[in-house]
Structure formats: structure tokens, C-alpha cells
Amino acid sequence: MSIRQLKPPVAPSIGFRIIATIALLTCSVTAWAQPALQTVSLEQLLARAARHPEVMIAGADIEIASGAVVAADRAPLPAVSASIGSVDLQNGIGPGSWVGGKRLDKALGVDWVWERGDKRLHRTRQAERSLDAAAFDRGDVLLARRIAISAAFWELLAAQDREVDSSIMLRSAEQMANASRQRLEKGDISEQEAARVFIETERTRSDYTALRGARHLAAESLAQTAALATDRMRRLAGQSCQLPSG
């Protein structure tokens, strides 16, 4: 995963572009495929926040609360009950129809709950307050996720800049080391001076390796924060898009 900061165009109205190149793991039916590159911008990453599992769970709570509001704004349905009793065990139930011919005590009842006052209104208002609370909770979760994605994005950008600066320093150090090696062969410098240059080159190389690893860690952090791997596995395909961030 890497981020490239493009030079701003001549027109002052168009801001610079920040392009995030995300390495996502693709999934096949039977096995994992090779990593694929997907280029997305900060705006696209922020748009993915709404599809993060935590945000989707909070959205499901809103749907549940909406159903509770609909159920609370309905009057209780009547309950119909039927019973049979006083069965003659010696003579049986007798011939005839079940309505009036058989020797049975039959009962049919209808129960209706009559809500007095504003009981239904208060119940609906309570469900609506629960719905508002669920909506606010989802907003908080979404905002926190967007903040985390933004922080991870800019951390990756900084990590890439540090890696680029270190690579430039490494190339310069390698050129100096090659020049020192040639001068040492010609006898222009001593072995101690050449050794100092070689040691400095190896130290620069070690710094570059560490910064490169830090950039990979920042890329993994951004992918996990934006749930890019989950989205990639679900869609089984990536898309490349470049949008201005400013």
C-alpha cells in the first residue's frame, strides 16, 4: 500500500490530489489469489466507513427501533378463545353436530384490551425516543470510524514520505560508497575513511529498511481500519479510481 502526492496543476482552483494505492488480498472460490493493487482516494475511504461492520451493526439497531415504533403505534389485537368441557366418559359425546348435537359444554370467547387514556401515545413516544437514540449512536460510531480512517490515511502518507526521503538518502550514500571504493582502489583515501563511508551507507540502508517496514504496517493499519479486506472478499474485484482530495 502506498500513497502518492501529485503536483498541483497550473489552475489554482484545482487542489492537489492524494492517491492511495491499496494492496488488497483477492479471494477466489477455492484459494487465495495474488495481492492486487487498488487505487483509492481519501474520499473513497471515508465513504467506505458507512460499510464498516461496526457502523452496519449500529444501522441494524436503527431498523429494529423503527420496527418497534410501528409495533407501538398499533392497538392490541383481539384474542379469540374456544374451550370444550364436561365430557361424559361413560356414554361418550353422542351423535350430532359439534355445534349443538353433542353432549359437550362449549365456550367461545373474545378478549379485547381497551387502552384508556394516552397509554398508546406514551408507548409510541418512548419507542420514538429509542429510535432517536439509536440514530445518534450510529452517528457517533460513523464519526469515530471516519476519524480513525483519516488518521490512518495521513499516517500512511507520512510513512511514505519518510520512506521516499530515506530512499533518496540511500541512493546518495550508495553513490558515495561506490566512489569511495574506487578511490580506495586508486589509493586516494585510506581504508579508515572508506570504512566510515561504508558503515554510514549500511546505517542508511538499515534506516530505509525500518521505514519501509513502518510503511507496510501503516498500510495494514489503514486496510484494517477501513475494512478494505472484508469489502474486497465480498466483491471479488477491485476498482481503480483517482479523485481530488482537496
Image: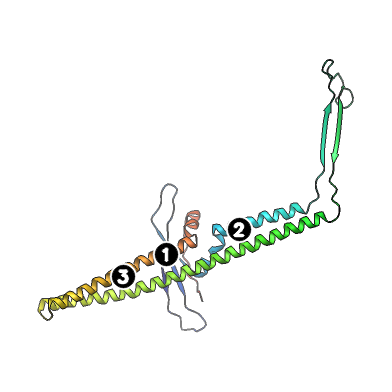
Give the residue at x 55% y 60%: 51
- Which numbered circle lies on residue 58? 2
- Residue 21 position in % (x across, y down): 43, 66
- Residue 105 position in % (x across, y down): 87, 26
> Of the residues under marks 2 and 3, which one precedes in the sequence?
2
In the shown orientation, is residue 132 left or right of residue 39?
right
Residue at image mark 3: 208
- Residue 174 position in % (x across, y down): 23, 74
Is residue 49 at least partly visible in the picture? yes
**Callout 3: SS:** helix
Query: For the residue marked with disc 3, what is the amino acid?
Result: Tyr
> Of the residues under marks 3 and 1, which one precedes in the sequence?
3
* Mark 2 and mark 1: Cα distance apart in space: 26 Å
Query: For the residue marked with disc 2, what is the amino acid?
Result: Ala
Q: Residue 158 lies in what quarter of the image?
A: bottom left
Q: Residues within 10 Å of mark 2 (few under 14, many from 20)?
A: some
In the rendered image, the residue lying farthest to the right is 100
In the shown orientation, is residue 187 left or right of residue 137?
left
**Callout 1: SS:** helix
Residue at image mark 1: 219
